[in-house]
Image (cartoon, coloured by chain):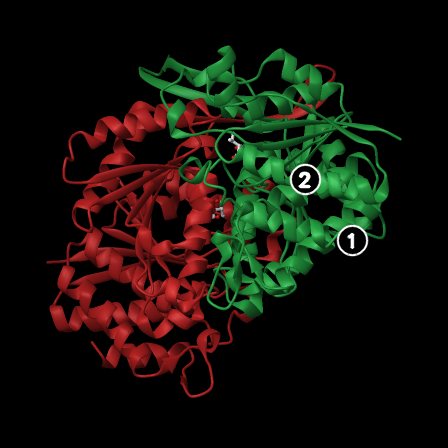
Chain colours: A green, B red
Amino acid sequence: MSYKITVIPGDGIGKEITDSAVEVLKKVDEKFGLGLSYTYKDAGGTAYDKFGTPLPDDTIEACKASDGVLFGAVGGDKWDNVDPALRPEKAILGLRKNLGLYANLRPVKVADALVEYSPLKPELVKGVDLVIVRELIGGIYFGDKCESEQHNGAERAWDLENYSVPEVNRIAKLAFETAKLRRGKVTSVDKANVLATSRLWRRTVAKVAESYPDVELNNLYVDNCAMQLAIRPTQFDVIVTGNLFGDILSDEAAVVGGSIGMMPSASIGTSTSLYEPIHGSAPDIAGKGIANPMGTILSAAMLLRYSLHEEEAAKAIEAAVDKALADGYRTPDLWKEGFQKANTEEITKVICERI
Amino acid sequence: MSYKITVIPGDGIGKEITDSAVEVLKKVDEKFGLGLSYTYKDAGGTAYDKFGTPLPDDTIEACKASDGVLFGAVGGDKWDNVDPALRPEKAILGLRKNLGLYANLRPVKVADALVEYSPLKPELVKGVDLVIVRELIGGIYFGDKCESEQHNGAERAWDLENYSVPEVNRIAKLAFETAKLRRGKVTSVDKANVLATSRLWRRTVAKVAESYPDVELNNLYVDNCAMQLAIRPTQFDVIVTGNLFGDILSDEAAVVGGSIGMMPSASIGTSTSLYEPIHGSAPDIAGKGIANPMGTILSAAMLLRYSLHEEEAAKAIEAAVDKALADGYRTPDLWKEGFQKANTEEITKVICERI
Ligand SMILES: CC(C)[C@H](C(=O)O)[C@@H](O)C(=O)O
Ligand SMILES: CC(C)[C@H](C(=O)O)[C@@H](O)C(=O)O
């Protein structure tokens, strides 16, 4: 057995958190004999500074040639005045498109030890266990657009929201497959009372649902979903939605989960998939060794699960993170009186010891 | 002095809540001698049942001829299978377009007595006092759309998101004017890292800001705003955004406020404006006399303020609602042990007595 992992630290705290996750991966590798190897590549502002582009071809090629990509974070004020087409975010949009990362999976599962960190009341958050399945390479993100044109005597700009039946089929199938392995409930989110694209989305999802008689399908308008996530997040199992609504709702759901530093994500591609924490590059604390690496560590667990099908190793990581929290260790972002403060290096060690 | 108000009860609990608000209006009219008169018109499912259209021309004409429109709510499962073009929601979209209701103002102010009703922790909600200014007759809601076409060998649907400079100018000015009378802070929400329309939005808002040196302008991405509303809603004063983002964020913000039944809104037009509670028509409790009319009563107060410039009368209503709550009265949706339960009729009486 042998697996090739491309590691893209990116900018800001990216190096610290991916270093930590790789240490944890090495530990499970030792234990389970996975045969993992690592290739490091640049992306984001760091790549721009070195090569004049946020996403070198070399990085794309390495990703394509590997079994899974572990991504840190990109961005920072430093690149605010760079040409929009060369900003750090373009790296992540470019990777999505080039690797065909059509689905973003965002689990929000609140560890009992972390219930109190949510802005929501503990009784609303306890037991939350949902996944948002966001379409990631279609919709208004990648539709035609126009920065400026004259129209009816005024300057206007536009973007085309659009979905095709095959695009919706693909993401809907993934959502139903995901739900089958969970609590069997899919909530499809759209704005079908206003948007034609949403009406095509809704009727296509309904057709896919026919092949999954054991999975329950509900439709919800996006505005209502934004409410329900805050009122009663435990009602959700799998939420499936388009690129733009998914962007908004998955960030809202992450906050409900309480500690952004803990949240992993998987971006599923047709051949290679990419895994990253949902938080940003936090330039303000970069290099200080205090970043919370657990979102990245849990992303590495998702990589083991979805790309390498090493379920046992994935579970070992997740259990070790839970155990570290239950044992009272907290990174600075989560620290409160009565707990044991652990910086990036310390929490990594604590987690490795529990594997 | 004499003012003409068009009242559109609509469907479900619409009749009960507008009846209640009109009673309160009559009470302030008595006290302040406003000379209010009322014309009742149909819209929504009720209008569809009577006239075969959710928005009769006669209703539009009456609105145009009046000084302000008080709207209840429309919709209900009953009309789920009606031709999409004739569904109850079309009444509200049609009124927006026909009356040129270009801005939706959604204040979220949490009365001290209601802090505990929010899903958020009380310490996060106490002191929340924000207004969302949503553009209401542009953007993807009213852009060109296509229900189905062949494209690259597949069926697709599309909707055009678009904004022109004059549209953004108009809504931005309203936001800055609103902020000037408040705490002097505007947060403009967009997705400028992805959408061309958002980039035009952002540069246009920045230009408008130059005329308001005393108002502070911040830009926020919509995904981040969805987070911030849940993490620290007290940070906001005026939020200005487009039609679709406004739909989502204003509903999320309403939930943060705690009790949807309490939330009013104003849709500002170039000549006539429309006022309605943000909640729906609640067919399940229609006719039972238990609906919370306070969102509609507070909408009537906004009508007095913005359309009739009767600030004193508006304040009298708002103070009476606050007083009723502080005195321990609660409609069934808000009732808890230790409080005085009041149905629609009773809470109306309690509020009238306090004017
Ligand atoms: C950086 C940005 C383009 C990106 C997105 O909107 O998809 C981010 O918000 C995300 O959700 O990964
Ligand atoms: C009913 C629907 C078309 C409407 C909208 O999306 O604008 C509603 O959600 C609202 O916010 O008033």
Mark 1, residue position = A182
In the image, taking residue A166 as reference, residue A81 lies left or right, namely left
User: Disc number at residue A23?
Assistant: 2
Q: Position of residue A8 (x, y in %)?
A: 61, 27
Q: Amino acid at mark 1?
A: Arg
Do dots 1 and 2 share one subunit?
yes
Please name the residue shown 52% across and 52% down the image: A255
Residue sitting nearer the eye, A265 or A171:
A265
Secondary structure state at the residue bearing disc 1: loop
Q: What is the chain identity of the residue bearing mark 2?
A: A
Please name the residue shown 64% across and 21% down the image: A97
Residue B308 in sight in this render: yes
Q: Position of residue A188 (x, y in %)?
A: 67, 45
User: What is the crowding at mark 2: few (fewer than 14 residues within 10 Å), some, or many (at least 20)?
Assistant: some
Quadrant of res B190? top left
Please name the residue shown 60% across and 51% down the image: A347
Earlier in the chain: of badge 1 and badge 2, it is 2
Residue sitting nearer the eye, A336 or A64:
A336
Q: What is the chain identity of the residue bearing mark 1?
A: A
Quadrant of res B340? bottom left
Mark nearer the viewer, 1 or 2: 2
Residue sitting nearer the eye, A138 or B173:
A138
In the image, residue A87 above or below residue B114: above
Q: Amino acid at mark 2?
A: Glu
Question: Circles 1 and 2: CB distance less than 8 Å?
Answer: no
